[in-house]
Image (tube, rainbow, N blue to C red):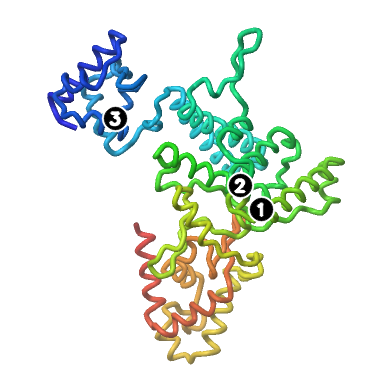
Amino acid sequence: MGKGTAQQRFFDFLILKQKQVKTFNKAEVIKATDWKPDTFKTYFGKGQITQFVIKVADDKYEAINTLDITFVEFKKRLSQSKHYQELGHKCKSNLAKALLKKSRDNMMLALELYNRPSLENKLDGFVMLFSTSWEQLLKAMLIERDGEESIYRTATKKGIRETISLRVSLDKLLKANDKVRKNIETIADWRDKAVHLLMPELQGLASRIFQSGVLNYSAKFEEFTDTPLFHSQHSGMLSLVGDFKLPPASVLKTFYGSAANEILELAANVEKEIADSNDIEFAIPINVSLVYAKDGKTIIANASGKTDDLQNLKNALIINKTVNPEDSHPLTQANAIKEIKKELFDKFDTNKLSRCLVSRDKNTGKPTFNSNCFQACLHKLKWKDGNNEYHFYQSIANKHIFSPELVSEIVKRTSQNENFIKEAKTSLNKNNRI
């Protein structure tokens, strides 16, 4: 956008039109600003001026948001808009824009609530916010396609205008066999018919359906608005539970009385639906990792929820049998250190170990491998940055556990590179000083 006088003239023009409460056309803007004929079309089409100009009809616009700001603030907002598109900049209807903003806020609230560690039962709030968010997004889409009247029912005898329901909105936009629709309807059914049964014990199963719902929403939101739901630094994912096991019926009956039978029946029905559907748009497979998976430098899949990425994830799924982390990672830190020391001292003589190991036993003066060495290795190899074949973090117990493969790998690296432990400790000490 042109600097200086062109911006000032544009600002003055918008202030005048807003004060007069008058509409204007593209030719009037071009005349007032000396822009080229395609300049206004480009700026408006890219959403760079939609925070100040709204379209009310073909080649008819209104000025907004200019009376309470200075020219300096106006320039600042225009400058920022070059790198940030206003949500709903493609929408002709202000109501559709407002619904989009409410929809995004409600989905963000649903995610924040679900991921809050202090809440034991997150399910009730999530299903309500999730359903409301989808309803608002679908209504915004209907307004843009069919007009604002399309989201209203016939007025009652008292003249009260009610909007259509979530399910009617789905009927208008998604086919009956659509898996995205099935996911929404399942969660909406929980909200309407079974919210009293959504106990914490169902979280492991429900989270799989919730996560697919969030991915579906994110993809549909970006497709419609040309704006990503999540910024690049935000994952936007739920805290998925890796292994779903209901407590025995006797335990549930102790907690919930006769309602335990209904809870078990609900769980069984949902589990069957997931198995029958076998589709990521309905429920996430039990052990899908929603992160970048890399083979060398090649990105295999990305589950950020963007339109293209959701398809990539579906194409890239590799389903393996679920493994209990305590079976694959049975070692505590103390046990892992003990196994590493045993293997080192069984395989190598003292001269070799003196060159490989930096630390010395306080009593004997002999080379040793201690907890500081262990932490240095973890830091250097970045194994504690996430769950992997060497390390697993149990969030509920706040406990790190390790695999036998870690023992073998540390022994291997220590013996093959005699400076490995020294380099690892140097790296860890440098990091601690930062």
Residue type of the residue flagged with mark 1:
Ser
Label ID, residue 219: none
Q: Which tag, 3 or 2, sits closer to the chain's start?
A: 3
Disc 3/disc 2 C-alpha distance (Å)? 35 Å
Return the x and y of residue 303 as percentages of the image width and height. 49, 53
* Dot 2 and dot 1 residues touching (CB under 8 Å): yes
Where residue 80 sits, quadrant-wise, is top left
Identify which residue, 158 or 48, lies in the foreground. Answer: 158
Residue type of the residue flagged with mark 3:
Phe
Return the x and y of residue 421 as percentages of the image width and height. 41, 76
Q: Is residue 45 left or right of residue 247?
A: left
User: Which residue is rendered at x = 70% and y = 38% of the image?
Assistant: 190
Q: Check disc 3 and report the residue beneath it.
A: 44
Return the x and y of residue 315 as percentages of the image width and height. 51, 60
Q: Which tag, 3 or 1, sits closer to the chain's start?
A: 3
Q: Check disc 2 and report the residue beneath it.
A: 179
- Quadrant, the C terminus: bottom left
Disc 3/disc 1 C-alpha distance (Å)? 43 Å
Q: Check disc 1 and report the residue beneath it.
A: 277
Residue density around tag 1, few if under 14, some if 14–19, many if 20 or more, within 10 Å: some
Q: Is residue 31 above or below residue 404?
A: above
Return the x and y of residue 103 as percentages of the image width and height. 51, 32
Where residue 319 sits, quadrant-wise, is bottom right
Residue density around tag 2, few if under 14, some if 14–19, many if 20 or more, within 10 Å: some
Secondary structure beneath label 2 = helix
User: Which residue is rendered at x = 62% and y = 70% of the image?
Assistant: 328
Disc 2/disc 1 C-alpha distance (Å)? 8 Å
Q: Is residue 390 above or below residue 33?
A: below
Residue type of the residue flagged with mark 2:
Lys
